[in-house]
Amino acid sequence: MSGSPGVSAGSRVEPVRTCIGSRRRVSRSALLRIVVIDGRVVADPKAVMPGRGAWLTPTVEAYETALARRAFRRAFRLDREPDTSALLEYLRARADSDPAAGPNAEAGEQSLTRQEQAERLMDN
């Protein structure tokens, strides 16, 4: 069989995206898509909003890193820094409501088996 090592026939390879904060490449499901609407950066958790999108690890730490790197302006090709307050509120609310969304949430996502990931998606 030809193909990538470690990928069995019939399995799907999940898309990989780069976090604008940490610059790490991670599976798409572990990141949050963000878009700019009327000069404000907003979360797009279902990844369906129109327009240019960027990907961010859904933690306040990744947000702060992206802010310090001025990554929002670059990712969205803007002339000035966008308003990111709505995104910060979303991330804080997510962290408060989901204890698994803490600083080690990304590592926890990677350790789940494909079956566990499918079960989590079906529960939502």
Image: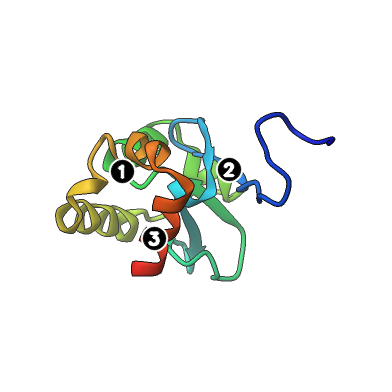
Q: Answer few, some or many: residues within 10 Å of disc 1's Cα (few below 14, many 20 plus, some between 14 and 19).
A: many
Disc 3/disc 1 C-alpha distance (Å): 23 Å
Q: Position of residue 78 (x, y in %)?
A: 57, 50
Is label 3 or label 1 in front?
3
Q: Position of residue 46 (x, y in %)?
A: 47, 67
Say which residue appears at 48% left-offset and 48% top-offset: 114
- Residue 51's disc is none
On screen, residue 13 versus residue 21, left or right, reads right
Q: Is residue 92 above or below residue 105?
A: below
Judging by the rendered image, the residue that carries numbered circle 2 is 17
On screen, residue 103 versus residue 69, left or right, reads left
Q: Answer few, some or many: residues within 10 Å of disc 3's Cα (few below 14, many 20 plus, some between 14 and 19).
A: few
Q: Is residue 111 above or below residue 100?
A: above
The residue lying toward the viewer, choosing from 111 and 17, is 111
The residue lying toward the viewer, choosing from 68 and 101, is 101
Disc 1/disc 2 C-alpha distance (Å): 16 Å
